Image (cartoon, grey):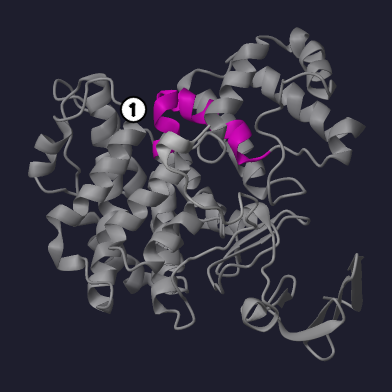
Amino acid sequence: MPGTYNDRIGDFTMDAKTNSKSATLTVGGKSYDFPVKSGSVGPDVVDISKLYAQAGMFTYDPGFTSTGSCESKITYIDGDAGVLLYRGYPIEQLAEKGDFLETCYLLLYGELPNKAQKADFDQRVTRHTMVHEQMARFFQAFRRDAHPMAVMVASVGALAAFYHDSTDINDPQQRMIASMRMIAKVPTLAAMAYKYSVGQPFVYPQNNLDYASNFLRMCFAVPCEEYKINPVLADALDKIFILHADHEQNASTSTVRIAGSSGANPFACIAAGIACLWGPAHGGANEAALQMLADIGSVEKIPEFIAKVKDKNSSVRLMGFGHRVYKNYDPRAKIMQKMCHAVLKETGHANDPLLPIALELERIALSDQYFIERKLYPNVDFYSGITLKAMGFPTSMFTVLFAVARTVGWISQWSEMIEDPAQKIGRPRQLYTGATKRDYVDLGKRK
């Protein structure tokens, strides 16, 4: 907190001075002191963990928009500057120079691997990509038209029933085995969910393929012909995975941490994260952005659409723009835009009618004062839907792909939480506005 901060609401005042690293909360003439903590980068935080014990009150922060729920060394976001760092490395550098499994290693272990470590890690992930053969029978219990995300929630949670030797969260070796298994097996389960949804046979992973190529083959290969890996699509998918690998304490990551804080096994925690990701306000945003472009229909209709967006009485929303954290251009969106053009050109969809609509919307959003004032810049979801559609994935698989990428982030955050001695079981409090104490009235006497 730079300088001195004073806020007054009624008889409530708070003074925080960074030179003493303490904050004073004054309520009704009584003052309480709380420590101010500083991270390696980013805003300071007031540690109010003893607020209730000292003052008998809670803070009120719906959505936890101003609350730090944990201490973490994994991901840092500066929303105002449009910065995303994994373990200190800019997302742009990781996407341009590395691959997804290198990013996985970085998130899990805290440092980029050397050549030998990278080869060993790649080999360990590759050798874990198969799932227990009985999992195939597990899939047969779902309806033919089951949504792939419903299948993912169930199948990832069911891994705990197949791999009992890696559910002891107090054993570091078992935690790492579970982590490796999920990074390796979630893509296989995702491909199985897709194959099941389209009525095609499951395709087993191949150990001679890289992570993204293997996933593409499991999704799109069929037994009756040889599948050829398209390096442009494989590279694009690998970068998409990097861009979505982690994103600080978002809704699904917080869900994983809260589930894990109870001591739940890692497979159950990741399944909980997938369930949260399924929400349209979180993982389903790229599908919503794609639907918006389709609804607009043509560049000529954009002015009419923009007018509705600006109309306070209209329910029309601009999807794929703005972000809960980013108040600047989402750094992932710039990378995704470049990949989108490469994929469209490679697949013969360069004349996709949605792309000109997307480009014109982006131009307007970056030049129109209405959107600039509201900081509605394009986010990663704006282009990812078009890209995945051109690669052949149906919209029902968009969030599944998000889950494949985010698994390593969830696992890294979960592991960090388990090893944090300060971590407690998640237990938010509330501002109660219901009835006060009242006595029970017998049924026959009630009016």
Taking the view exactly as shown, the residue that stands out farthest to the front is: 445
Judge whether 152 appears above or below 82 on screen.
above
Image quarter where the N terminus lies is bottom right
Category of crowding for the residue at label 1, using alpha-carbon neighbours closer than 10 angstroms: few (below 14), some (14–19), many (at least 20)? some
In the rendering, at what x and y percent does residue 79 appear? Answer: 72, 55
Q: Secondary structure at mark 1?
A: loop
Work out whether residue 89 or residue 119 is closer to the camera in this orientation and state it: 89
Image point 49% across, 46% down: which residue?
Answer: 239
In the rendering, at what x and y percent does residue 442 appear? Answer: 42, 42
In the rendering, at what x and y percent does residue 9 appear? Answer: 89, 64
Exactly how many numbered labels are in the figure?
A: 1
Taking the view exactly as shown, the residue that stands out farthest to the bottom is: 20
In the rendering, at what x and y percent does residue 306 appear? Answer: 80, 19
Residue that mark 1 sits on: 147
Highlighted magenta segment, given as a residue range: 379-400
Residue 175, image quadrant: bottom left
The secondary structure making up most of the magenta span is: helix
Is residue 382 magenta-colored? Answer: yes
Q: Is residue 56 visible?
A: yes
Q: Amino acid at mark 1?
A: His
Image point 75% across, 39% down: which residue?
Answer: 377
Judge whether 212 appears above or below 105 on screen.
above
Left or right of 239 on screen, residue 299? right
Image point 27% across, 53% down: which residue?
Answer: 184
Judge whether 388 appears above or below 47 on screen.
above
Q: Is residue 217 visible?
A: no
Judge whether 258 appears above or below 288 on screen.
below
